[in-house]
Amino acid sequence: MFAENLRRLRLERFLSQRELARQAGVHAVTLTRLEAGVTAPSSRTVRALAAVLGVEPRELTTPHEVAELRRVLSGAKQPQAEETSPALQPER
C-alpha cells in the first residue's frame, strides 16, 4: 500500500521521482526502490516524503505496514533458510 500511495500522490502533484527525491532529501534510487516496493522506508523518510507531498505521514503508510514490509523483505532475501528447514529434510 505504501508504494501505491507514494506513486499516486507523487503523480497527482506532477512530480518526477528525481524531483520528489531531491526535495525530500533522499537519493533518487531510493525513491525508485520505495515505489517498486523492494525496500521499506525509515520513519524519517516517510516524514520527509509526506512533508514534500503536503500530507500527513499516515496518508502514506502506517508503522504496522512498514514493519510488515520489512519482515517480508528480510524473509525474501534468505531463500536458503527454507531449504535447510528441518520440516523439509527427508525422513530417515
Image: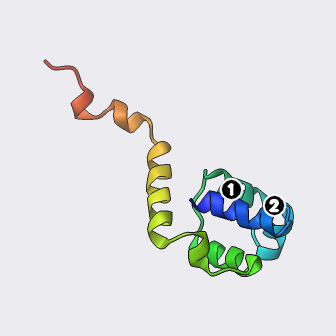
Instruction: Judge left or right: residue 86 versus residue 60.
Output: left
Instruction: Judge left or right: residue 63 versus residue 54.
Output: left
Check the image and name the residue furthest to the front. 12
Q: Is residue 56 above or below residue 68?
A: below
Q: Amino acid at mark 1?
A: Glu
Q: Amino acid at mark 2?
A: Gln
Q: Secondary structure at mark 1?
A: helix
Tell me which residue sits at (85%, 61%) in the image.
16
Check the image and name the residue furthest to the left. 92
Label 2 CA crowd tier, 10 Å (few <14, some 14–19, many 20+): some
Instruction: Judge left or right: residue 16 versus residue 69.
Output: right
Tell me which residue sits at (77%, 74%) in the image.
25
- Quickly name the residue at label 1: 35
Q: Nearer the viewer, residue 2 or 22?
A: 2
Instruction: Judge left or right: residue 91 versus residue 61.
Output: left
Label 1 CA crowd tier, 10 Å (few <14, some 14–19, many 20+): many
Q: Is residue 31 above or below residue 60?
A: above
- Quickly name the residue at label 2: 17
Tell me which residue sits at (71%, 61%) in the image.
8
Asked if the residue under mark 1 is in contact with the one under mark 2, i.e. CB atoms within 8 Å, the reply is: yes
Q: Quadrant of the N terminus?
A: bottom right
Q: Is residue 73 above or below residue 9?
A: above
Q: Position of residue 51 (x, y in %)?
A: 71, 81
Q: Secondary structure at mark 2?
A: helix
Q: Mark 2 vs mark 1: which is more N-terminal? A: 2
- Residue 26 quadrant: bottom right
Q: Nearer the viewer, residue 64 or 83?
A: 64
CA–CA distance between discs 2 and 1? 9 Å
Q: Quadrant of the C terminus?
A: top left
Tell me which residue sits at (60%, 55%) in the image.
39
Residue 9 numbered mark, or none? none
